Image (spheres, helix red, strand yellow):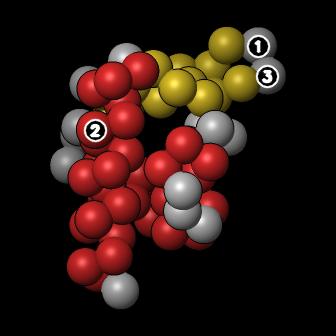
């Protein structure tokens, strides 16, 4: 499972490099992975201080730190 989380984190990182900022709800669709795995991978990236979150109206946006 840890390997899957790491691979998903890599795909999220690449997606954020391409899009610069993306809504939290779109990430699972864009990387083609289930929500729980995406959220675990985002947690991994957040723990490593590699992503940041901001809220714009009702949306949470994620970007590279």
| Residue lying at 54% horizontally and 43% vertically, measured from the top left | 30
**Is residue 19 depicted above or below 10 in this figure?**
above
**SS category of the residue bearing label 2:** helix
CA gap, disc 3 to disc 2? 25 Å
| Residue lying at 33% horizontally and 76% vertically, measured from the top left | 4
Name the residue tied to disc 1: 57
**SS category of the residue bearing label 3:** loop
| Mark closer to the chain start, 1 or 2 | 2
Horizontally, is 30 left or right of 44 in the view? right
Badge 3 vs badge 2, beta-carbon distance below 8 Å: no
Name the residue tied to disc 3: 58
| Mark closer to the chain start, 3 or 2 | 2
In the image, 55 versus 64, the foreground residue is 64
**SS category of the residue bearing label 1:** loop
Q: Residues within 10 Å of mark 1 (few under 14, many from 20)?
A: few
**Quadrant that contains the N terminus:** bottom left
The numbered mark at residue 14 is 2
Q: Which mark lies nearer to you, 1 or 2?
A: 2
- Residue 25 image offset from top left, x and y in percent: 68, 40
Q: Residues within 10 Å of mark 3 (few under 14, many from 20)?
A: few
Farthest residue in the bottom direction?
A: 1
Q: Residues within 10 Å of mark 2 (few under 14, many from 20)?
A: some
Question: Is residue 47 visible in the rendered structure shown here?
Answer: no
- Residue 56, picture quadrant: top right
């Amino acid at each position: 499972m840890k390997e899957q989380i790491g691979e998903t984190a890599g795909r999220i990182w690449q997606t954020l490099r391409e899009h610069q900022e993306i809504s939290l709800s779109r990430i699972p669709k864009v990387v083609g992975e289930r929500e729980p795995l995406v959220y675990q991978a985002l947690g991994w990236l957040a723990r490593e201080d590699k992503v940041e979150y901001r809220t714009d109206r009702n949306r949470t946006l994620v970007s590279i730190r």
